[in-house]
Image: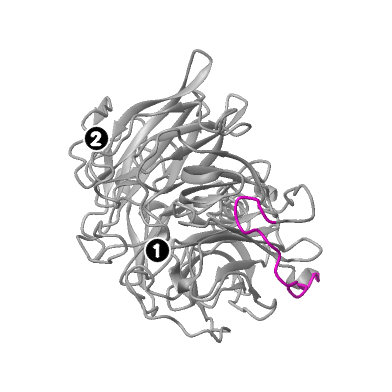
Amino acid sequence: MRKVLLIVLSGVVGALWGADWSSQSGNPQRDGWARGEESLVKDQVPHLRLLYKVQLDNQSKGPDALTSPIVLSNLITYKGFKEMLFVAGSSDNIYSIDAALNELLWKTHFDSKSAEPEASATSVCPGGLTASIAIIGGSSPLGRGFGAARRRATTPGPGVGPGQGGAAHRPARTPDLPVSPNNDVFSSGFGRNGYVFAIGSDGYLRFVRQSDGNDTAIAPIKLVPPHSKVSSINIGGTTVYAATVDGCGEHPNALYAIDLGGPDRNVVTFATNGSGFSGEGGTAVGADGTIYGHVDSGHGDVAGKYNDTVLALNAGDLKVKDYFTPSTTVPSGSDTVSPFGVTPVPFRWKGKDLVVAGGKDGTVYLLDSTALGGADHHTPLFKTEPLISNVGNDAEHGIWGDFSTWEDTDTNVRWIYAAVRGPLASNVKFPLSNGSTASGSIVAFKVEEQNGRPVLTPQWASRDLIAPASPVTTNGLVFALSTGQSLQKDSGTEANHATMYVLDGTTGKELFSTGNDAATFTHRSGLALANGRVYFTTHDNTVYCYGLPAQQPQLTER
């Protein structure tokens, strides 16, 4: 009896300190760092195995199928404590799976609220739900930094006028949200019964109750134009952000924001007048609530012509605070269709807030968050040589998705990892290289100090990966997903099957591979990592879960 009690108590303690993976790349900062992970460490990685896979009844839309998974570490339900895995499907579906038991808990389907007919599907604009979903919080264990997501970001000034780098405006007021404790959209805390934030193909922001999938307790709000292609949902304070890309639905690309904790709950729009915000994350939220994004081409009244421009926007009202545009001009692609690109990521280094960003040619920039491009808006703190060998010849090659970054607290060394699609330039030298990079690779840098300024020092390039997704990191490990998809933009043509690799974060050495487990490729979907398990999805609407069998007897001994 005592042994059983100890097992139960240890499970409860584990639940108390479980970690979430709340959005694309883990958190609003999009840094891909699973903080507080204890099980997935170097000496255990060779023991990773497929714990389960589950095929969902979602219908793929062109190359799109399931979004990046997110994880809620614990929720008190009528079945007890649950660790819940959420994933959205292109056919306007949201699914919840018991992450620890491989049990489908609920499915919610969105019926369209739009009267606007859907345009004919194309490979770039296949229609359906496209935005990665989100919950409030981050990639830290509960009780350690969780509450930061609930605090409201400060927004300087109540109004938004024209001329702030795009067509910023306030449409008609949206209906008030209920504020009762039982259905507060920002309910939080241990055992909280909160909501999954999702954007359906009709452009409405939905609030799906985590415990049972109910999406009627809080009325949907129209956030983006119907049939838009949305990269990801981000939540900073009480403001929800969504970036549209590729001009789908014949709507201009823009960033949309709504402050659900504000007095009026209006939707604010920042038009890019060109391509949309780059990267799978779309936007990243800084420590002070600043919104960071990268725009390949377009123009605005503050920054002028965009060309690999990094924008810093005020939280909530989306006014331009600062910007950086490289002094060298790289040929732009389409004014509407966004090229492969990467979301800028803010991080802390030696008491300073820096931003890492990437250009079309694979140049990686370090920027000072207090003056992104210096006095002239063209001067970074540091930049690498272009990483891509054939820039200008192939718009499908470049740094892609989101960066991943972490700091080794034992050595105070900051690491940065990037997914590169296409071959590395021959003049770019990484001291440690692990084979051919003809199709793509993960590359690693250290942030080091030279003459009082931060620089990026190349460390290693991984083995060849087919169109790699955004890397994620924990405990000195890098999890890399070779998507297996064709490099033809959004073609959905299968080149191979998806394969996940675990790499040594300091050397790039391969420690584990999923081999031929996956049957097909993955598209616009990344990795999720929480509580000793790592997840990814594939185009046949299958969710894969890997972990350590010895620590998951409920999954491996039945």
Q: Is residue 291 left or right of residue 45?
A: right
Relative to 529, does residue 510 appear above or below in the rendering? above
Q: Main secondary structure of the magenta part?
A: loop
Q: List the residue tagged with mark 2.
A: 425
Kind of residue indicated by mark 1 = Leu
Q: Looking at the image, which is closer to me, 16 or 298?
A: 298
Q: CA distance from mark 1 to mark 2?
A: 45 Å
Tell which tag, 1 or 2, sits nearer the viewer. 2
Tell me: 493 left or right of 260. left
Residue 38 vs 555, above or below: the answer is above
The residue range painted magenta reads 162-180
Q: Position of residue 31 (x, y in %)?
A: 50, 44
Mark 2 Cα shell of 10 Å, populated few (<14), some (14-19), many (≥20): some
Q: Nearer the viewer, residue 169 or 315?
A: 169
Q: Is residue 469 above or below residue 245?
A: above
Q: Is residue 216 magenta?
A: no
Q: Report whether 324 appears left or right of 558.
A: right
Of the 4 image quadrants, the one containing the C terminus is bottom left
Q: Earlier in the sequence, mark 1 or mark 2?
A: 2
- Say which residue label 1 marks: 555
Residue 118 falls in which quadrant of the image?
bottom left
In this view, 52 is above or below 473? below
Residue 190 tag number: none
Q: Which quadrant does the N terminus fall into?
A: bottom right
Is residue 165 found inside the magenta-colored segment of the image?
A: yes
Q: Nearer the viewer, residue 186 or 205?
A: 205
Q: Is residue 38 visible?
A: no
